[in-house]
Image (cartoon, rainbow, N blue to C red):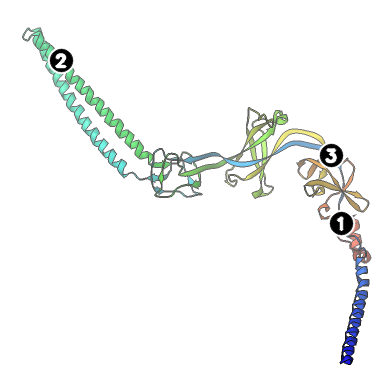
Amino acid sequence: MFRNKARISLIVLAVAVLFAAAWAYTRSGKSAPSCEAAAKSPARVVSVELVEVSRGELKESLTLAGALKPKEQVDIAPKVPGRVQSITVHVGDTVRRGAVIAVFEDDELKQQVQRAAAALSVAHAGVAQRKAEFQNAQAELKRASSLRDEGLISAQDFATSQTTSAVVRAQMDLAEAQQQQAQAELRELNIRLEQLRITSPITGVVANRYVDVGALVSPTTPVVRVVNLSTMVTAATLPERELGKLRPGDTASVRVDAYGDEVFRGRVARIGPVLDPATRSATIEIEVPNPGQRLKAEMFARVELDLASTRQAVLIPRDALVYRGKQPGVFLAQENTPVFTPVETGQTAGGQVEVVANLEPGTRIVGRGAAMIREGDQIAPAGKAQSAANDPARAAAGVVR
C-alpha cells in the first residue's frame, strides 16, 4: 500500500515538471516574434499639395441664417358656428382666392331664409295697400278743399279729411319701414347662409387640415391653413455696426440644404426701425421669389449679403482648413512633417477662407490632401510622392499617393 502511494506521488511530480517545461518553452518561443512586432513601423507618407498663405482682397459680405416662411399664411376659420358637412380640399391642394374649401350644415338656416322671404312678401303687400289708401285719402282731401272753398262743407269736416290723410300717410310710412326691416332680416340670413360656405381669402396651397366632416366648429377653430409659396421670406438679425452698409433692395444669395450649392436670388425687403436693446441688432427681412415652389416653408436658409465693399485679408484655400473637434486649424509644412496649428477664421468667399489670427502671409501649409493626414503621418509634395510610390523600397516602407 505504501508502495502504491509513492508511485502515485512520483507520477504527479513528473506531470507537473513536464507541464512547467512546456509552458516555459511556449513563452520563450513567442517572445521573440512579439518583440519584432513591437519594433517601430515606417511612417505613412501622404501625397499633398503645398501652398503659401497669401494676402488679398476680400469682398465684404454677411452670412445670416434663418427659416423660410411664406409671405402670406392664413388659418381659415368660420365666422359662425356650425357642423362640417363637407370639405373639398386636402393637404397639398392648390386653391384660388374665393374658392369654397368647406360647407357647413344649413337646413335650419335655409328654413329661416324662407320664412324671412315670406315675411318680406307680406310687407310688400302691406306697403302696396297703404299706398292705395294714401292715394285715396289724398283725393278725398282735394275734394274737401274744393268744397270748403265753395262753402259747401264746414271747416271741421275739412280738418277731419286732413287728419285722415295724415293718418293714412303715417300708416304707409310704417308699412315701408316694416318692409325695409324684412329686407334687412332676409339679407342678414342670406349673409349667414353664405358664411356657412368657407372660402379661401388668398391663392395658395393647403398646408394643414385641422377638422374632418361632422366636426362641430366655432369661429375660434380653424378649418385649414393656406400658404402662398410664390414668395418666401426669411428674417435674420443684423448687428448694429453693419446697419449702415445695407439698404432695402440690396441683393442676397440664399442657399438651402435640400439643393446643395444652388443659389436662389433674393432681396432685402425691410430693415427693422428699432434695435433689440439686449443684442444691439435689428431684424431684417429677405424676400426670395419662388416661382416653381421648390422652396418649402421652414427650410433652413443661409443668406449671404453683398456689402459692396472690399478689404485686405489673409486667405487660405478651403481645402487647407481642417478641424480637431470644433477647433479649426491648418497643417504647417515643416520639411516632411505636418504640424497642426489652430487658427481663427472669418468670412468664406468662394474657395477661400479668411484667417484673422495665428497665421502670417507666406507661411507654407498643406492644401489639398490636408483632410487625409493622421497623427504620425509624413507628407510629400504630389510629384515627389508619386516618384516615391514608384520606388519599391519606399513603397514597402508605407509610401502612399
Report, in whole angstroms, how far the alpha carbon at label 2 lies from the one at label 3.
105 Å
User: For the residue carrying disc 1, how many other residues have a C-alpha within 10 Å: few (<14), some (14-19), or many (20+)?
Assistant: many
Determine crowd level at label 3: few under 14, some 14-19, many 20+ residues with C-alpha closer than 10 A.
Answer: few
Q: Is residue 247 above or below residue 339?
A: above
Work out whether 98 lies above or below 27: above
Closer to the camera in the image, 185 or 228: 185
Find disc 3 in the rendering and name its residue.
357
Q: Is residue 302 left or right of residue 78?
A: right
For numbered disc 2, what is the local secondary structure? helix
Q: Which callout, 2 or 1, points at the residue further toward the start of the chain?
A: 1
Q: Which mark is residue 47?
A: 1
Residue labelled with disc 2: 163
Q: Which residue is drawn at 86% across and 43% down?
A: 53
Residue nearest the observer in this picture, 380 or 171: 171
Front: mark 2 or 1:
2
Residue at 22% from the left image edge and 30% from the top image edge? 124
Spatial separation of the CA atoms under disc 2 and disc 1: 119 Å
Q: Residue furthest left?
A: 152
Query: Three-letter amino acid code at disc 3?
Result: Ala
Q: Are the two marked residues, 3 and 1, in contact with CB atoms closer than 8 angstroms?
A: no
Disc 2 marks which amino acid? Thr
